[in-house]
Amino acid sequence: MILDKVKKRVDKGEVYHQRRRETTVKFDGWRLKSLETTEREGNSLRVVKDGRVGFSATTDPLALDRLIEDAIGCAKFGERMDLRFPEPKETPELDLWDDRLASLNSERMVEWGKAFIEIFGEHPKDLNLEMEFSNSILEEKLSNTSGLEIEIKKALLTLKIVLMRAREGDILFLYESDTVCRFPEDMERRISAMVDGFKEKLRRAEREATISEGVPVIFSPRVVPALLIPLLAGINGKNIINGSSPLVGKLGKELFDNKLTIMDDGTLPDRPGSSRYDDEGIPKRRIDIVRDGKLTDYLLDLVTSFKLGRESNGCAGRSIFATPSPAYSNIIVRPGDRSSSELMDVEEGVLIEDLLGVGQGNILSGAFSNPFGLAFKIEKGEITGRVKNASIAGNIYENLREITGISKETEWIWGRFKVPFIRLDNLKLALKG
């Protein structure tokens, strides 16, 4: 209806509709804290009129005429750009809708939370639990004046668990998170495995250990995203266009160790970041970001690709009130040829399980500086105790030029990163005490 009203008044137009329903169950202090369901629905309109781009958005279903007038009015002052909205194009089927997950109710999530508490059993009084289950149903519709009409439906379940132990002069955080788009038939097994993992880390953390400066550092899969987040900011087309990325003009350059290959693949089955199309209607595909150490591509949407004189590679993400912008789907780091135990076969080293403040600071420069959330000393290939009061600092554009090793094993982290263990022997450690 919106497109019918607007298409005779503009050169080109695009209507995006989103509806999101989310049910969240929270536990705190080993008890159920809250249940909440929220719902949001709205439309955004992007137009090109007289060669200029206008945008408006609303969540008011009675304000659609105003939506149109605002977008057209905005175009008078908008950026001059001949955006080419995509025509319909068939893509391989990719079923990401699960009726069972979509109908998941809060009672079932409460049962899962109580099961975690029961399986964990007796716990120290200074150990606090925060746990959250969130079931989201996302429906998106996109149509444009090029004849494109697509609909995307997805159900997601996200689980977050934080254990915090506060003692005099010491705070220990243990964290677990996952997102799935299929009903977890094996949730009880997953919960039991999480409990075992938490208890093992707590046991290992009871013994303290000190490390020397300049020792090898092994990143467990759960902290490898700390090395990738600055890179993802650097390859974002917006940062390439505005010149703030250090990767401007670096396509085809050998910037990293030749062991490193990184891909963004939005076509994987049963992954939360997957879809047949991006949020501008461009078919998703696998993108080689880094291939054998060479930078091979950026993440682009229609606007950034237009400004670079290229074609969009299907990386647009959006919300109701924000214009599309480049976003990643599923990030995969190619496995290496050594086992994680081989990477840890050192006289002295440190295994990092968690970092605090990931993604903060001047990430566009490639720099990172993070205190240890949880780290263990390695002696002669064995974990001997927890390393406290230490932090790590570096720059991915320097440190990833020389990677000691990448593991054969990989894990899905946060639902959208499939990553291995990575060992670096060129990092700076800051030790206290």
Image: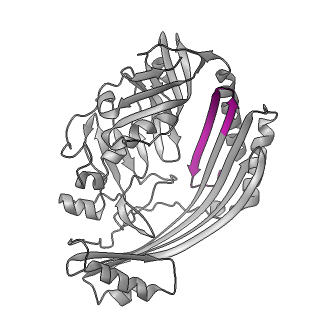
67 vs 182: above or below: below
Q: Where is residue 291, by image quadrant? A: top left
Report the front residue among 407 and 344: 344
Q: Give percent across and percent down for residue 178.
A: 58, 46
Instruction: Report the quarter where the C terminus lies.
Output: top right
Residue 158 can be seen in this image: yes
Q: Give percent across and percent down for residue 153.
A: 52, 67
Task: Name the magenta segment's main secondary structure.
Answer: strand
47 vs 336: above or below: below
Residue that appears at 75% across and 42% down: 116
Instruction: Report the quarter where the N terminus lies.
Output: bottom left
Residue 345 can be seen in this image: no
2 vs 204: above or below: below
In the rendered structure, the answer to whether residue 382 lies left or right of residue 261 reads right
386 vs 54: above or below: above
What residue range appears in magenta? 163-186
Residue that appears at 57% across and 55% down: 181
Residue that appears at 62% across and 17% down: 208
Q: Where is residue 6, by image quadrant? A: bottom left
In the rendered structure, the answer to whether residue 27 lies left or right of residue 411 reads right
Q: Give percent across and percent down for residue 37.
A: 67, 66
- The question of residue 142 being in magenta is answered with no
Q: Give percent across and percent down for residue 130.
A: 69, 45
Image label count: 0
Residue that appears at 73% across and 34% down: 127
